[in-house]
Every structure is written in C-alpha cells, then in structure tokens.
C-alpha cells in the first residue's frame, strides 16, 4: 500500500489516470525512473531510450520470421510504453518538468507508433499490395487524431484541477509568437507544437473562447469549490470513455493483439469502426460543455463561435 501511495504521488492527478496505468505502467515506470535517477539520466534521455525501444519493435516486425520475433517486438513496444511513463515520473522526481519536455515526449510517442505501423505494414506488403499502405496510413492518422483529442480533455482536466500552467492549452497565436524567438532544435520542436496546438483548438469541442470561459470559473475563488465538484461529476466519466477508445493503452493493446494473431491487416478495419463510438462521445462532450457553462453563466452565448466547433 505504501508503494501504491508513492506511485499515486508520482502522478500529476489520479483522476486522469487509467486503471492499467495506475496499476501497471506507473508502478513499473516509477521503478525505472528511480533507476534512471541513480544513473544520473535526464528525462529527455529516458524519452530517447523509449524511442529506440519503439524503433526496435518496428524493425523486428519488418524482419519477423518467427513467433519469437513477434514476442520480442511486443516486449519492446511495452517497454517503450513503460519508459514513456518513466520520463514524466523522473521529471517530477527531479523537479524538471517543462512544456518543452512535454512536446518532446509527444514527438517520441509518435515516432514509436509510426515505427510499429511501418514495420508491420511493410512485412505484409508483398501479400496485400500497395493498398495496405493506404489503409495503414489511414489507421495511423485516425490513431493520431483520436489520441490528440483525448489529450485535449485530459490536459484541460489537469489544468483546472492542479493549476499547472504547463497543462494549459494555448491558442495558436500564442505559440506563433513564441516560436519566432526559438532557434535550432527548439525551433523544430516549437514548429511541431504549433501544428499540434492548431489541431487541438480546431478538432476538439472547445475553442480558445470556451476554454477561457471554463478557466474564468475554475480560478474564481468564489466559484472554484463548486466548479471542481461539478466538473468532476460531469466530465470524469466522459474522460474514461475517451480513454477507452482513444487512449494510448487502447491503441497499444489492439496493436499487440492483432500483431500476435498475425492479422495486422484487420487492424485498420477496427480503427475505422471505432469512429462510431468516437463520434458519439464527441457529441456528448459538446452538449455537456455547453450545458456546464450555461449552469454557471445562463447568459453565456455560444452563437458567435459555433462555427469553430
């Protein structure tokens, strides 16, 4: 129980943790983070190891010739996920969390999954022809967009509850101003972040105007306690549904299942069918966003920015 409490303390907020992460990824990730701390490693170095593990998984899937290769590829993919958890936990242990680290973490996560998609697709290319590349690319795009939208609501939840400004989703105009002052590698990361923020503001149900409306209530000393209670009741169950169909664990698990079954060709079909629950959840989210803001401000009008949603 003491270790589990330590694990919970190593997370930003238990409310946004998936059960799989809380009882598997976070405990093992914390052990890896502690080992990394003793070795004097930085969070970015752990992220780099996560990327190498994911690329290794993709290479094994491309050169697979036996079930053993598949198992090793799956182990490396799982290990990449554990390291992905460990880098954030290490950053919190060292007090080295930063927005730049979050950007790098997201970029590494994308590289890992692109490697796995690419390796698995190229292996079955001779059997299915070039059309499988189109289907896999579509599955990859859906994977990326769904993960991005889930991350939007997760970050909002974290920002409103923890008041951590690194979790605040800025407008694209804010990022545009900041990226002009960056150079070299940081400039490249900020360009990636700018594209990411554009999608966050354009694909979710909350544009910057609505997000500011939420924040104005969340950080109002008079309304904050009521806001937090109401927000948890309204959106915590919905966040769980976003995780089920859009989270990293969902995608990693589905990939593992189809890879081990030797039927990666069916994985894109599953991705396409999950658009149905995804669209339903998005519709519910949109209605609840509006209802929630009206509860605190009956005079609030959505008409002037409906087109942004």
Image (spheres, rainbow, N blue to C red):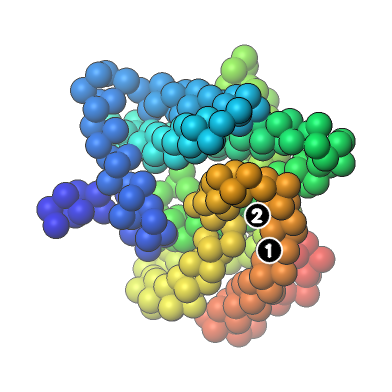
Task: Out of 287 and 251, give the one closest to the viewer.
Answer: 251
Please tell me the numbered disc located at residue 146. Answer: 2
Neighbours of disc 1 within 10 Å: few (<14), some (14-19), many (20+): some
In the figure, 242 relative to 149: above or below? below
Q: Report the residue marked by disc 1.
A: 274
For image coordinates 54% across by 84% down, the residue present is 295
Please tell me whether mark 1 or mark 2 is closer to you in this view: 1
Estimate the x, y position of residue 3 in percent, counting from the top left: 16, 49
For image coordinates 37% across by 60% down, the residue present is 19
Res 282 → quadrant: bottom right
Most extreme residue toward the right, as rendered?
A: 130
Estimate the x, y position of residue 159 in percent, counting from the top left: 45, 55
Res 124 → quadrant: top right
- 151 horizontally vs 206: left or right: left
Task: Out of 132 and 2, give the one closest to the viewer.
Answer: 132
Residue 297 seen from this side: no
Estimate the x, y position of residue 203 in percent, counting from the top left: 72, 56
- The answer for how far apart the CA atoms under marks 1 and 2 are is 10 Å
Q: Are marks 1 and 2 in contact (CB under 8 Å)?
A: yes
Residue 121 seen from this side: yes
Quadrant holding the C terminus: bottom right
Task: Out of 114 and 233, give the one closest to the viewer.
Answer: 114
Estimate the x, y position of residue 15 in percent, counting from the top left: 37, 63
In terms of secondary structure, where does tag 2 sit? helix
- 277 horizontally vs 252: left or right: right
Most extreme residue toward the left, as rendered?
A: 2
Quadrant holding the N terminus: bottom left
For image coordinates 66% across by 70% down, the residue present is 277
Question: Which one is earlier in the sequence, the residue at label 1 or at label 2?
Answer: 2
């Amino acid at each position: 129980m003491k270790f589990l409490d330590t694990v919970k303390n190593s997370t930003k907020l238990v409310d946004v943790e998936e059960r799989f992460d809380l009882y598997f990824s976070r405990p093992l990730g914390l052990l890896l983070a502690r080992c990394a701390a003793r070795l004097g490693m930085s969070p970015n170095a752990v992220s780099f190891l996560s990327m190498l593990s994911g690329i290794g998984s993709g290479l094994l899937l491309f050169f697979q010739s036996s079930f053993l290769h598949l198992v090793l590829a799956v182990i490396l993919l799982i290990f990449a996920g554990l390291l992905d958890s460990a880098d954030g936990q290490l950053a919190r242990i060292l007090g080295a969390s930063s927005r730049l680290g979050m950007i790098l973490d997201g970029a590494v996560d994308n590289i890992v999954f692109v490697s796995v998609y690419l390796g698995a697709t190229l292996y079955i290319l001779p059997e299915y022809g070039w059309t499988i590349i189109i289907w896999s690319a579509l599955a990859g795009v859906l994977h990326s967009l769904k993960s991005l939208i889930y991350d939007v609501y997760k970050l909002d939840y974290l920002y409103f509850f923890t008041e951590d400004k690194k979790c605040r989703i800025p407008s694209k105009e804010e990022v545009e101003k900041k990226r002009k002052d960056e150079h070299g590698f940081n400039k490249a990361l900020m360009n990636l972040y700018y594209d990411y923020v554009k999608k966050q503001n354009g694909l979710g149900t909350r544009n910057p105007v609505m997000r500011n409306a939420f924040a104005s209530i969340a950080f109002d000393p008079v309304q904050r306690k009521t806001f937090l209670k109401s927000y948890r009741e309204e959106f915590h169950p919905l966040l769980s549904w976003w995780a089920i169909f859009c989270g990293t664990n969902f995608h990693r698990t589905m990939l593992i299942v189809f890879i081990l079954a030797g039927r990666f060709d069916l994985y894109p079909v599953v991705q396409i069918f999950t658009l149905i629950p995804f669209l339903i959840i998005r519709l519910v989210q949109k209605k609840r966003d509006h209802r929630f803001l009206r509860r605190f401000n009956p005079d609030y009008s959505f008409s002037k920015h409906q087109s942004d949603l």
